[in-house]
Structure formats: C-alpha cells, structure tokens
Amino acid sequence: MIHVHNLVKSYGDVQALKGVSFDIQEGEFFGLLGPNGAGKTTTISILSTIVKPDAGSVRIAGHDLTTDQEGCKRSIGVVTQEIALYNKLSAWDNLLFWGSLYNVPTAELKERITETLTLFGLADRKNDAIETYSGGMKRRINIASALLHRPKILFMDEPTVGIDPQSRNLIFEVLEKLHKEGMTIVYTTHYMEEAERFCDRIGIMDKGQIIAQGTLAELKNTGGIRESIAVTFNTLPEVLAGKLIEVLGEACKITGQTLHYYTANIQADLSKLILRCGELGADIAQIEIQKVNLETVFLSLTGKQLRD
C-alpha cells in the first residue's frame, strides 16, 4: 500500500532525513516513533504531499508521489499536529468545507458528516462554533475532517497530544474501528502505550534514519534486551554479594544493594531466586519484575527518552 525508498530531505544545513526506507501493507497499523527531531513529522509531511523530498521515491496506493500527486492525495487523509479548523464556523460548516475540497457530492457529504459527528460523539454540538469547543473536541473534529472522503490511508501525526482522557478514549475506539474495517493507518506518537496498543509494526527513527522496524516481538529481539528480576536488599555485605554471584552465575549482576537476575522465564526462576537468597541469609527489601516493553527497547536503541 505504501512503498518508501531512500527518502532524503534537508532544511538548509540540517539533514532531516538520511535515506529513509520502509513498506506498509494494506490494512496495516504502522507506528513511527522517535525523539523530537528524529524526522517523523518530515516523513509524514512528505507522504502527505505537503513537503517535497530532495531525493528518494514514494508510492501510495499504486500512485507515484512524483508523477501522480493528485492520485496520492485522493487516497489519503491527513491529521496534523496542529488543529486545522476555522474557529468562527460551526463543526458542521467546517466539515462541509473540508469535505467539499474532495468533490464529494453534497447530499452524500451531508450524510457522511452526520455519521462522522455521531461517531465522534459531537452530533449534539454540530451547530456550535469551534471556538466554543474544548481542546479534545477540536481534536475529534480535526480527525473527522480527514475521514469524510473515505480515504484508503490515514496519516496521523501525534493526534492525542494535550487532550482529556475522555476524548483520547473515544479517539482510540474510532481508531480500533477503522483498523478493524481495514484502513491503513500511519501513526506517530510520543506515547509508548499507544504504539503498543495499536501498531501491527513499528519503525523507530533517530537522527533522520529508521534504526529498527518490525513487530514488538521482533523489536525486542533487535534490542537484545532481556527480562530481569530486580531484588533489593536491606543490607548486602560484600561477602554475601560474592556468594550470590557464585551461586547464581553469569545471569546476575549486582549494583549497590540491588541484584539483577536476567532470565528467559521469570515465572519459573522467581521462586528459585527467592529460595537461594533465603538460603544465603540475604535480607530482601523489595522485588521488582522488569519486563521488556517498547520503552525499554526504545531506550536501548536510541539512548534517550522519547520526550527529549
């Protein structure tokens, strides 16, 4: 559905993209993660036909981005970080305006607007000016405007930043519905839990490049991170620490008062570890299970937090 090959883009002396390549299958929910400045928004802007690349090629739903930009535009819906609505107009008039840009017949467009307002829980506020809406309500209308022409592909650039929990939850329900119906969705987010919840595959970007991509399971393997049991002791004399290392072997590492035991089977090894500590007289204060998730993979690959 989407083929991206060797995208390059610079802004003056800053090289935003340094040869980005990836493929997205029809009906796939694909996430782009990366710290600020990694190139996520530039990539989405190019795919959305907003920005022209310096080099590279893109095919969207069978259309070449260079030679058939109109075909690409008809196939996509775009939800940008910034709210793109007219504050003085009502929600209905905003949607009527944006939908008309795609040449949807008026009668059909009005039906779609009614359906979409209902889907986003705003049918009862359709005649109110956007300036009276909360931030979360504006976000919902912003997303609604990108769906009126029934696009095959939806690009979403951090669509849930700064909104209330109720609006976020409703947007999640809509995304799950669209995904289930087979829409291809490309999604950037600062929230790891969103990517873990929705994405079939994830591309991790850093410094203008895709440094890893795949399913969450595949990314865990790429990161080379192991799950561990962290045991913190009230006291851990040097002699006792030496005995623990001797008994537990290379699977353990001790930092200060905490022992990290790396394992492929936490459930099986947890009771054994507690037993060994008890036999050696170690005074356990706290036990923490440290599972591998998307955040630990991200930090392993980029060495920085997502909100840098």
Image (cartoon, helix red, strand yellow):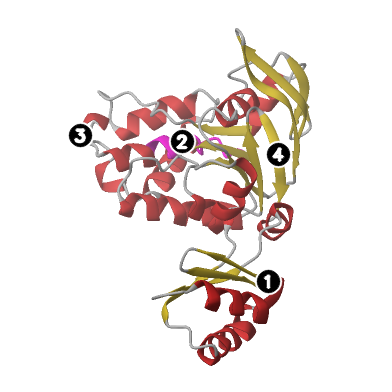
Residue 17 as seen in the image, left or right of residue 59: left
Tell us which disc is closer to us: 3 or 1. Answer: 1
| Alpha carbons under labels 2 and 4: distance apart | 17 Å
The span picked out in magenta is 141-152
Tell us which disc is closer to us: 3 or 2. Answer: 2
Identify residue for label 1: 251
Q: Position of residue 45 (x, y in %)?
A: 58, 24
| Alpha carbons under labels 3 and 2: distance apart | 33 Å
Tell us which disc is closer to us: 4 or 3. Answer: 4
Q: Nearer the viewer, residue 74 or 244?
A: 244
Residue at image position (67%, 23%) is: 17
Q: Which mark is residue 132?
A: 3
| Residues tagged 2 and 1 counted as in contact (Cβ below 8 A) | no
Q: Residues within 10 Å of mark 1 (few under 14, many from 20)?
A: few
| Residues tagged 3 and 2 counted as in contact (Cβ below 8 A) | no
Q: Is residue 270 above or below residue 254?
A: below
| Alpha carbons under labels 3 and 1: distance apart | 59 Å
| Alpha carbons under labels 4 and 3: distance apart | 43 Å
Identify residue for label 2: 308
| Residues tagged 4 and 1 counted as in contact (Cβ below 8 A) | no
Residue that sits furthest to the left in the current view: 132
Q: Please tell me which of labels 4 and 3 falls first in the chain.
A: 3
Identify residue for label 4: 211
